[in-house]
Image (spheres, rainbow, N blue to C red):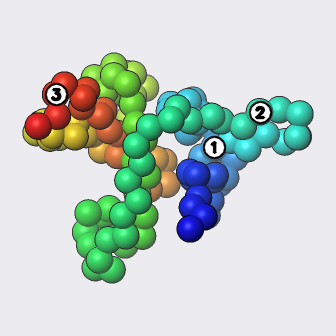
Amino acid sequence: MEKVSGIGGFFFRSRNPAALGEWYRDHLGVAMVPKDYDSSPWRQEAGPCAFAPFPEKTEYFGAGRNWMLNFRVGKLDAMVSQLRAAGISVDIDPQHYPNGRFARLHDPEGNPIELWEPAAPDERK
């Protein structure tokens, strides 16, 4: 069977696409789609990606939300400090899970974002 090799894009509606794109670029380092074919788009590092449909009535993403982005980060504490210094509220999950650590925040339009610092292979149980 032929399989996809990864996620090639994430497309969603926004009240102010330009401002929201700038927020993701400035605070998370996610560059928006280039305006020409000579420029390179944002590139991800290879790594695990969870693809998980949730029950229709889940509250995991927040009330009335249909999706949540989860970004892998190398140093969760450093990323959280950087975001908080910029005035962005971030909640760190105090529990350390077998697959790593997590934090939650919202973009300026209230969309949920989860940051995930994967556990090192020797930390997994």
Give the structural element (helix, strand or loop) at label 1: helix
Q: Amino acid at mark 2?
A: Ser
Give the structural element (helix, strand or loop) at label 3: helix
The residue indicated by pointer 2 is 40
Q: Is residue 72 above or below residue 113?
A: above
Asked whether, in this view, residue 1 is left or right of residue 52, the answer is: right
Of the pair 18 and 57, the residue shown nearer to us: 57
| Image coords of residue 77 (percent x, y) | 28, 23
Q: Is residue 5 above or below residue 24?
A: below
The residue indicated by pointer 1 is 21
Of the pair 50 and 30, the residue shown nearer to us: 50
Look at the image and tell me in which quarter the N terminus lies.
bottom right
Q: Earlier in the sequence, mark 1 or mark 2?
A: 1
Residue 46 in sight in this render: yes
| Image coords of residue 12 (percent x, y) | 59, 62
Of the pair 74 and 81, the residue shown nearer to us: 74
Identity of the residue drawn at 31% across and 27% down? 76
| Image coords of residue 119 (percent x, y) | 24, 31
Q: Earlier in the sequence, mark 1 or mark 3?
A: 1
Look at the image and tell me in which quarter the C terminus lies.
top left
Q: Which mark is residue 123?
A: 3
Q: Disc 1 vs disc 2: which is toward the camera? A: 2
Q: Which mark is residue 113?
A: none
Give the structural element (helix, strand or loop) at label 2: loop
Q: Amino acid at mark 3?
A: Glu
Q: CA distance from mark 1 to mark 3?
A: 35 Å
